[in-house]
Amino acid sequence: MAAKKKKTDANPQTGGQQRNISENRKARFKYEILEQIECGIVLVGSEVKSLRDNKISLDEAYVKVRGQEIWLIGADIAEYRQATIWNHDRRRPRKLLVHKRQLQKLSAKAQEKGFTLVPLHIFFNERGIVKLMVGVGKGKKTHDKRQTIKSAEAKRSIARAMKTKR
């Protein structure tokens, strides 16, 4: 009797693991991220096709709570060339999907003074679904940013020194 093959739920397009599309590096520099929440995002077909080509910019994007919903505003998803007249608007607000408890938690944090909701990175999950990681951040002061730069430079110089020793 032949051995049974294990069934896998891996998506052949993503290789069975998360595939990062884009990261908002400025967010980690400008904000101290205290908490992260994974959200779904409502997209149209041409936007998904464009995301598969990594055509998105989260640099100027932010997350806003409106009533009982949260929205991604300012994210620039490039038009998909082959979609012609059925293309999407590049900078339209996009609704984010979270559980009600997560929404209440996020909106409570966002209303506190000094806290903001920031999109950190967008990715395809194991099943090939687009997800957005949203962080609750507190703005860094100038001296905190300088400290971040110093520590990054120190790590780079240590890595260079280790590389040349080999």
Image (cartoon, grey):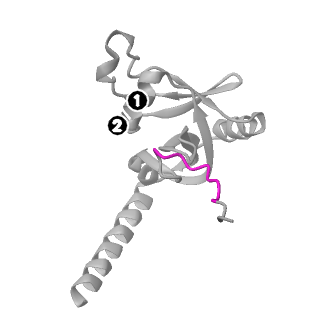
Relative height, residue 120 to residue 52 (above, below): below
Q: What's drawn in magenta, residue-wise?
A: 5-13
| Residue at (56, 50) in percent of width and height | 10
Total label count?
2
| Residue at (78, 38) in percent of width and height | 101
Q: Residues within 10 Å of mark 2 (few under 14, many from 20)?
A: few
- Secondary structure under the numbered disc 2 in the rendered image: loop
Q: Amino acid at mark 2?
A: Asp
Q: Tell me residue 152's x, y (percent).
A: 36, 68
Numbered badge on residue 53: 2
The residues tagged by marks 1 and 2 sit, at their Cα atoms, a distance apart of 7 Å
Q: Is residue 3 left or right of residue 92?
A: right
Q: Amino acid at mark 1?
A: Lys
Q: Tell me residue 88's x, y (percent).
A: 41, 17
Q: Locate the C terminus by quadrant.
A: bottom left
Q: Tell me residue 34's x, y (percent).
A: 61, 54
Which residue matches tag 1? 49
- Specify the farthest residue to the front: 1
Q: Locate the N terminus by quadrant.
A: bottom right
| Nearer to me, 29 or 2 | 2
Relative height, residue 107 to residue 161 (above, below): above
Q: Contact (CB < 8 A) between labels 1 and 2? A: yes
Q: Is residue 85 left or right of residue 138?
A: left
Residue 99 belongs to the span the image colors magenta? no
Q: Tell me residue 51's x, y (percent).
A: 41, 34
- Specify the farthest residue to the right: 101
| Nearer to me, 27 or 134 | 134
